Image (cartoon, rainbow, N blue to C red):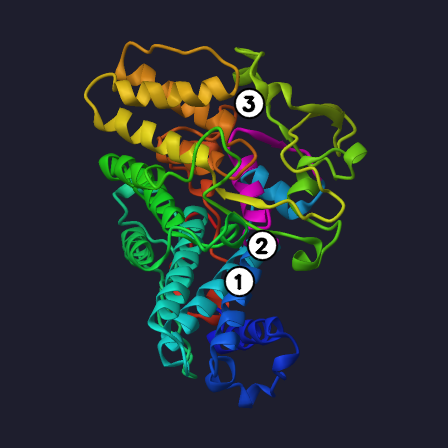
Amino acid sequence: MKCLKVIYVILLSVVLGACGDKLKLLPEQDLADEVVFNSVSTTESALRGIYSNVQKFEVYGSLPQVINDFMGNTVEFVGTFPTLQDLNNFSAVSTNGDVRDVWRYNYEVILQSNKLIAQVGGVPGITSEQINQFTGEAKFLRALIYLQLAGLYSQPFQINGGNNLSVPLVLDQFVGTVNFPSRSTLNEIHAAIEADLKDAIELLPVQYGSADETRGKATKGAAYALLSRLYLYRDQNDLAASNAKSAIDLGLYGLTTSVDVFTIMNSAIDNGRVGAGGWASYYNPASLRGRGDATFSEALIAMFEKEPEDKRFQAKISGIATDGISRYFPMKYPDAINNSDNSPVLRTAELYLNRAEGLAKASGGVNAEAVSLVNSIRAKAGLPNKNPTSQDELIELILVERTKELAFEGHSRIDLLRNKKNLRTDDVRANYGAPKTVLPIPQREIDTNVQLRGQQNPEY
């Protein structure tokens, strides 16, 4: 990994900047933990700094999610960015700038979280309740980022039972000694995510006072939901179903409400990149101030056209794409000027789909509750009930509804791979298990970290 000292100085500057005028930036050699963690208020500002970093374009501000969509089968990328074109065509190289930046900024969030987790217990005047909350939030965010990184840079669990190499696992705070970790296995990364989320479930509240206070913050329900997703990725279907149910049973998340489980709350000020990047810039045509880079794929259109009355399909618009052709675009991200659309991380619909899929795969036949759950998703979209007659038919129904419901939210690639499906039908490089269905380890990391040499993903 790139020199951890340099990365930590960068991220600590972000934290200090989040504290406003209360703190002054110090020279590099004088940056000290006692400045950042000398009160409850500055510690809370440090936590806000972590959320702020998660908002970044390269973290949950759309870049990794868009990559997952167009490498999958829901989005056709027609943009002009060479680095994204290479990923779309499964021809990327290890010096790809987007691959490098996604790695760097996601690890900044991890290192920032590590520091807060290690330091929060020693903050003067802090209560046990505050320690629990701050630790739970940081552990949830660390788990979220590790799950994203593992999905991008390593083959899925289904390839080799999780024994394949994933990303470096760094859980300790930086204390001045530069460590260069090697890649951990996917099982090791998943075990760390599982441990963080189980801790978060114990430490986090169900709500923070009002709904407004809760919005955009990690909660017990969010931890259950992310743990459910992890277990789906690992084919631990009973656990995926039970953790989704634990979130649903909290009574806060219903398909008829507008409350999502966890979103990244964005604004133009937060993002600092008005009109440059962001969900809407990719997914909106020029007529709506977007670039028109990412459109409905032919596969997604064909899926929707089997039931054209689907409200999710009817919500589309036509517009001119970057390539000058009129294409279909979603209407999920209307603010292409300020890019202040919130990032959909864990939606209520995913809870229902996770539980349905877990139940369907864990059962020996047609699970009645799974049928009811997937039909509730269909009903919300204005579609009639379906009555599958076999387990395979039920699972396929759930996966189709998952594709349609979560389209343009960054799920397509990993959902296909974990179900042992090819990403595309017209390119052998997109076949399940093919080397370039995952991203390369950035060359800069290999150049600066001797432990990563010889650990590059195949064919890069």
Residue of label 1: 104
Q: In the shown orientation, is residue 171 left or right of residue 279?
A: left
Q: CA distance from mark 1 to mark 3?
A: 32 Å
Q: Earlier in the sequence, mark 1 or mark 3?
A: 1
Q: Which residues are magenta?
A: 55-79
State the residue in front, 6 or 220.
220
To which quarter of the image does residue 308 belong? top right
Q: In the picture shown, does residue 313 fall above or below 245? A: above
User: Is 88 one of the magenta-colored residues?
Assistant: no
> Residue at position x 53%, y 11% from top?
307
State the residue in front, 269 or 278.
269
Residue 255 in sight? yes
Name the amino acid type tagged 1.
Answer: Arg
To which quarter of the image does residue 288 belong? top right
Q: Cβ–Cβ below 8 Å for labels 1 and 2? A: yes
> Residue at position x 49%, y 28% from top?
256
Instruction: Give the farthest residue toward the front.
Output: 209
